[in-house]
Image: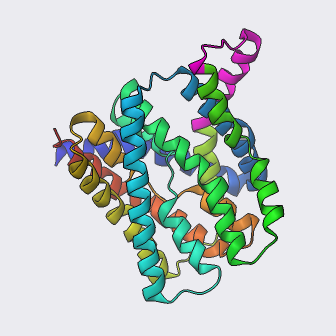
Amino acid sequence: MSYFWYILLNNVVPLTVMIAIGVVLYRAFKLDIKTLSKLNFYLFSPAIIFKMLYESSISLVILGQTLLFFFLFFALMFILAEIVIRLRRYQGGMIPAMRNTVIFYNSANYGVPLNQLVFVGDPFTLSIQIIIMMMQSLLPNTYGIYSVNASKRNDMRKTLRTIMTLPVIYIIPLAFLMKGLDIPVPGPIYAPINYISNAFIATALITLGVQLGSMKWELNFSDVMLANVLRLLIGPAVGFGIVMAMGIEGVMAQALVLSCAVPSSLSSVLIAVEYDNEPEFTSQVVFSSTVFSIFTVTSVIYFISFMT
C-alpha cells in the first residue's frame, strides 16, 4: 500500500498540479482557450512531434509492434463504443461525441509526462509513447473532424480543406523523411524547435487546466460515467489483453498498457467546441476522466509493476 501512495504522490499528483495551475490562471485572468488550443495545435504539438520523431531511435521492429498494438486497440475500443452507442440509441451529435471521448485519449500532454515520470526518462519507453502520440495526434485531426462533420452533414470539401491546414499531417512524414535520409536541421532553425518543444508539456497541461476551469462543473451522470468506464477501466484492460495475445513482455508491455490508461483527449473538446458538437458532454467527460484518472492511473501503474 505504501508503494501505491508513492505512485500517487510522485507520478500522478505532479500532473494534477500543472492542470490545477491552468484552472487557477483561468479563474484569475480568463485566458482564451481558443488561442491556447491554436498554439498547441499549430506550434507546440508539431514542434515536439518533429523533435521526438527526428531524435528518436525507433527500430522498425518496435515501430511495427507498437503500430499493430495501436490499431488493434483502436479497433476494439471503436467496436465497444459502437456497441454502447447502439444500446443507448444515441442520435445525431452524441454518436461521434461518445465515440471520440472513448477512442481519443491524452497520449501527449498527459501520456508523455506520465511515461517519463513512471519510467524515469527511459528513452525506450518514450519512443513507444511517441509512436502512440503520433497516431493520437493524426487521427483526431483527420477522422475525428471528419466524423463530427459527417454526422452534421456539413460540406465535406470544406472539412477536408480544414484538415489539410493542420501541420501535424506534414510534420510526421517530414520528420521520418529527414531522419531516414540523415538530413541535418540547421542550428538556427533547430534551436527554436528545441525551445518550443521544451515548453510543450507545461503549456499543454495548463491548456487542459484552462479548459477544465472554463466549463460547467456539473455532470450528465449516466452518459459521462459510461464514457469514463470505457476510457479509464475498459481501456487498460483491453490493452493488457492485447499485449498478452501478442506475447509482448517486460517494459514494452508496461509502457503499452500505461498508454491506454490516460483520460479522454483535449482534442475531443476542441473538436466539439469548434464544430458545436455536444461540447458540454465532451467537456464533462474530459473533466471527470481527468479527475478520476488520479486514482485509476495510479492503480494501473501499481498493476503493471508486477508485469515481467
- Based on the displayed image, in which of its 4 quarters is residue 255 positioned? top left
Locate residue 77 relative to residue 105 in the image: left or right.
left
The reply to whether the magenta stretch includes residue 193 is yes
Residue in front for this viewpoint, 101 or 8: 101
Residue 141: x, y in percent? Answer: 66, 53
The magenta stretch spans which residues? Answer: 179-201
Q: Quadrant of the C terminus?
A: top left
236 is higher (above) or lower (below) than 45: below
Q: Is residue 244 above or below residue 147?
A: above
Total labels: the figure holds: 0
- Can residue 165 be seen here? yes
Residue at the location (67% across, 36% down)? 46
Q: Looking at the image, can residue 121 be seen? A: no
Instruction: Please say if 167 is above or below 77.
Output: above
Q: Is residue 189 magenta?
A: yes
Q: Is residue 35 above or below residue 286?
A: above
In the image, what residue occupies the spot 60% across and 61% down? 268
Looking at the image, which residue is at 71% across and 50% down?
Answer: 37
Q: Position of residue 167 (x, y in %)?
A: 73, 41
Q: Would you say 67 lies left or right of 178 here?
A: left
